Image (cartoon, rainbow, N blue to C red):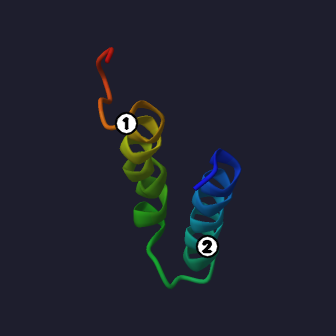
């Protein structure tokens, strides 16, 4: 998957979660934590799974 496509997928998931929170399908506190859950996947994407240390 190219970097552009990966960025679009992550952005689409974030926008969908925000919209679900606006319409009270998902609680607002859950929607606030979603970006924090995505960070490890974004970090490990570029480094082949060695997040947090130089490989």
Residue farthest to the top? 54
Residue at image mark 2: 16
From the viewer's side, name the closer residue of 24 and 42.
Answer: 42
Rendered location of residue 26, percent (x, y): 46, 78
On screen, 34 above or below 3? below
On screen, 40 above or below 35? above
Q: How many marks?
A: 2
Mark 1 Cα-neighbour bin, 10 Å: few <14, some 14–19, many ≥20:
few
Mark 2 Cα-neighbour bin, 10 Å: few <14, some 14–19, many ≥20:
few
Q: Which numbered tag is attached to residue 48?
A: 1
From the viewer's side, name the closer residue of 13 and 23.
Answer: 13
Q: Quadrant of residue 44?
A: top left
On screen, 28 above or below 4? below
| x 41%, y 31%: residue | 47
Rendered location of residue 18, percent (x, y): 60, 67
Rendered location of residue 32, percent (x, y): 47, 56
Q: 31 left or right of 40?
A: right
Q: 5 left or right of 45?
A: right
Q: Quadrant of the N terminus?
A: bottom right
From the viewer's side, name the closer residue of 26 and 15.
Answer: 15
| x 29%, y 18%: residue | 53
Q: Quadrant of the C terminus?
A: top left
Q: 13 left or right of 43?
A: right
In three-dimensional space, the C-alpha distance between marks 1 and 2, rounded to whole angstroms, equals 27 Å
Q: Secondary structure at mark 1?
A: loop
Q: Nearer the viewer, mark 1 or mark 2?
A: 1
Q: Secondary structure at mark 2?
A: helix
On screen, 21 above or below 36? below
| x 47%, y 42%: residue | 42
Q: Quadrant of residue 34?
A: bottom left
Q: Earlier in the sequence, mark 1 or mark 2?
A: 2
């Amino acid at each position: 998957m190219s970097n552009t496509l990966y960025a679009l997928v992550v952005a689409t998931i974030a926008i969908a979660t925000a919209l679900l929170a606006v319409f009270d399908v998902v609680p607002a506190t859950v929607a606030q934590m979603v970006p924090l859950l995505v960070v490890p996947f974004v970090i490990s994407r570029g480094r082949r799974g060695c997040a947090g240390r130089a490989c």
